[in-house]
Image: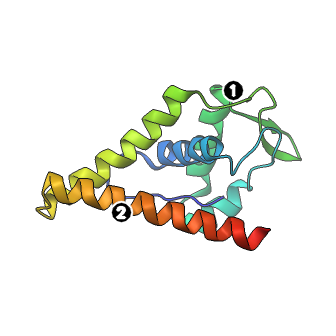
């Protein structure tokens, strides 16, 4: 599980960690019943205090997203079936908002942003086709 944490954006680190776990669920890199990395592993990976990671895991547990089994670890709840369409749209909208904000800071026009998005979609499609061809 890859976590992208930004200590400069003003959002508490434990909330960013929780959001990244939810994102991993949304994209399918974490599945129902799967074990999350230990608090210590995550803390070392992103260089934060283990208490911060533990707080994120407690937050996720309070939301019913994960279950902690004493002595065994923290697991994605088996009740988690799928991320809703609205949740997926929110995740992507947030990412796009950040990209648009950055593009505006770089003085990129709306036309340039639109063209770049279309270009990236086409590049993604090409990569996916190449990967599918290699997998066959």
Residue 111, picture quadrant: bottom left
Query: Height in image: 101 above or below 130?
Result: above
Answer few, some or many: residues within 10 Å of disc 1's Cα (few below 14, many 20 plus, some between 14 and 19).
Answer: some
14 horizontally vs 113: left or right: right
Q: In this orientation, which residue lies closer to the viewer: 64 or 78?
A: 78
* Residue drawn at point x = 62 percent, y = 48 percent: 24
Where residue 54 appears, as percent x and y from the top left, is 64, 46
- For the question of whether residue 12 can be seen, the reply is yes
Secondary structure at badge 1 equals loop
**Toward the viewer: 46 or 2?**
2
Counting every numbered tag in the picture gives: 2
Quick one: quadrant of the C terminus? Answer: bottom right
When the figure is inspected, residue 76 is found, relative to residue 98, above or below; the finding is above
Q: Is residue 116 above or below residue 14?
A: below
Q: Quadrant of residue 115?
A: bottom left
Element on which disc 2 rests: helix
From the top left corner, tell me how far across and down residue 53 is, in percent. 60, 50
Q: Which residue is mark 1?
A: 64
**Which quarter of the image is occupied by the N terminus?**
bottom right
Image point (64%, 27%), residue name: 62
Precedes in sequence: disc 2 or disc 1: 1
**How far is disc 2 from disc 1 in space, using C-alphas?**
39 Å
Q: Which residue is mark 2?
A: 119
Please report the residue visible at 46 percent of the width from the left and 40 percent of the height from the top: 91
Residue pictured at 62% horizontal, 56% vertical: 50
Label 2 Cα crowd, 10 Å radius (few <14 / some 14-19 / many 20+) = few
In this picture the colour scheme is: rainbow
**In this orientation, does residue 47 appear?**
no
Judged from this view, the residue extending furthest toward the right is 71
Position of residue 68 measured from the top left corner of the image (x, y, whole percent): 79, 38
Q: Looking at the picture, how far across and down is residue 61, in whole percent?
A: 68, 32
The front one of 59 and 27 is 27
């Amino acid at each position: 599980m890859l976590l992208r944490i930004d200590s400069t954006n003003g959002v508490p680190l434990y909330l960013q960690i929780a959001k990244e776990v939810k994102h991993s669920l949304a994209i399918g890199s974490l599945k129902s019943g799967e074990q999350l990395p230990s608090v210590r592993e995550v803390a070392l990976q992103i260089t934060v205090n283990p208490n911060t990671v533990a707080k994120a895991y407690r937050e996720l547990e309070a939301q019913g997203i994960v279950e902690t089994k004493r002595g065994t670890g923290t697991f994605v709840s088996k009740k988690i079936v799928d991320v809703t369409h609205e949740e997926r749209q929110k995740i992507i909208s947030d990412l796009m908002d950040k990209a648009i904000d950055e593009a505006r800071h770089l003085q990129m026009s709306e036309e340039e942003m639109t063209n770049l998005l279309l270009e990236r979609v086409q590049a993604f499609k090409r990569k996916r086709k190449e990967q599918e061809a290699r997998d066959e």
